[in-house]
Image: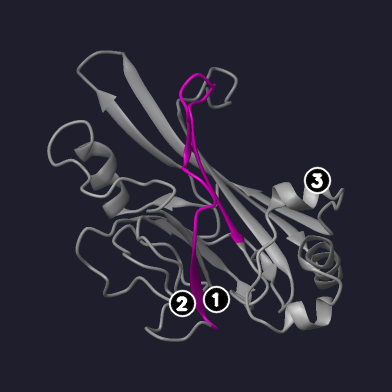
């Protein structure tokens, strides 16, 4: 399933029908190694070669913009995501039933990326690139700030953003997902407990291959609405 949107329908024995859709846009802003090295030199000191060898350094999008460094490339794809069963349990449980024990927040929320192109399945509970220990097939990065809820927009949206620094997620990005675990790391499979795997997407053609030294920022915007007469979601 390379692209998808979701719909649920409420109907009675009358001509009236209601439709609601969930759609996701995924955007990756990519700063290459030279841009990241230059920004780190400006931010941290005059010897970027030593800086770059001391591990994973993250330059925020805001810092790049303050330094007037635009991304070397930007990737975007619409409708490339499914809310999985755990996500729907969390969403509907917030309305009636069991509430979420650990709510998504700045300290409990991650975007994960992985190498698997396996089709999306409703019952999946982790990225399919998860192997249990290898950071070369999947990695989850804590969100940069609290998820943004915009209920006054048309349609209402929920937005997550994570920035992957120089030393992590250096592989082909073929899948993404979101969970509410509390630390960046290699994998979700087996964490169990109150961890919620909310969604998984497999964009057509993948998102590109991140290399060591680069900084990539991933932004998921999940829209909740209904189709208008013109076919747009409002």
Up the image or down, 190 lies above or below 29; here it is below
Secondary element at image label 2: loop
Residue tagged 2: 129
- Give the residue drawn at x 54%, y 27%: 233
Q: Which residue is mark 1?
A: 115
Q: Which marked residue is nearer to the observer: mark 1 or mark 3?
A: 3
Numbered badge on residue 66: 3
Q: Are marks 1 and 2 in contact (CB under 8 Å)?
A: yes
For residue 156, side relative to residue 219 (left or right):
left
Point 47% across, 86% down: residue:
134
Please provide the residue range marked out in magenta. Answer: 136-163
Whole-percent x, y for residue 195 in the image: 27, 60
Which marked residue is nearer to the observer: mark 3 or mark 2? Answer: 3
Residue 212: percent from the left, percent from the top?
71, 79
Q: Nearer the viewer, residue 53 or 139?
A: 53
- Which is nearer the eye, 84 or 110? 110
| Mark 1 Cα-neighbour bin, 10 Å: few <14, some 14–19, many ≥20 | many
Determine the residue positioned at 69% across, 73% down: 209
Badge number at residue 182: none
Q: Earlier in the sequence, mark 1 or mark 3?
A: 3
- Between discs 3 and 2, the one toward the N terminus: 3
Give left or right: position of 42 versus 137: right
> Residue 58 occupies which quadrant of the picture?
bottom right
Identify the residue at the far front of this view: 45
Q: Residues within 10 Å of mark 2 (few under 14, many from 20)?
A: many
Q: Secondary structure at mark 3?
A: helix
């Amino acid at each position: 399933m390379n692209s998808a949107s979701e719909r649920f329908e409420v109907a009675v024995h009358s001509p009236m029908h209601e439709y609601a859709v969930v759609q996701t846009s995924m955007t990756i802003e990519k700063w290459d190694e030279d841009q990241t090295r230059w920004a780190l030199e400006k931010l941290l000191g005059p010897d970027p070669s030593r800086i770059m060898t001391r591990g994973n350094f993250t330059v925020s999008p805001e810092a790049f913009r303050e330094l007037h460094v635009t991304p070397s490339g930007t990737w975007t794809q619409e409708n490339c995501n499914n809310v999985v069963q755990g996500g729907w349990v969390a969403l509907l449980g917030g309305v009636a039933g069991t509430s979420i024990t650990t709510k998504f927040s700045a300290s409990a929320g991650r975007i994960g990326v992985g190498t698997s192109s396996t089709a999306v399945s409703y019952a999946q509970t982790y990225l399919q690139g998860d192997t249990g220990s290898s950071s070369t097939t999947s990695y989850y990065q804590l969100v940069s700030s609290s998820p943004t809820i915009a209920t006054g927009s048309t349609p209402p949206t929920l937005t997550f953003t994570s920035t992957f620094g120089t030393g992590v997620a250096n592989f082909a990005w073929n899948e993404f997902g979101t969970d509410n675990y509390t630390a960046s790391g290699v994998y979700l499979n087996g964490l169990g407990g109150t961890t919620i795997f909310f969604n998984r997407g497999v964009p057509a053609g993948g998102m590109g291959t991140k290399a060591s030294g680069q900084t990539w920022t991933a932004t998921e915007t999940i829209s909740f609405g209904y189709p208008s007469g013109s076919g747009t979601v409002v």
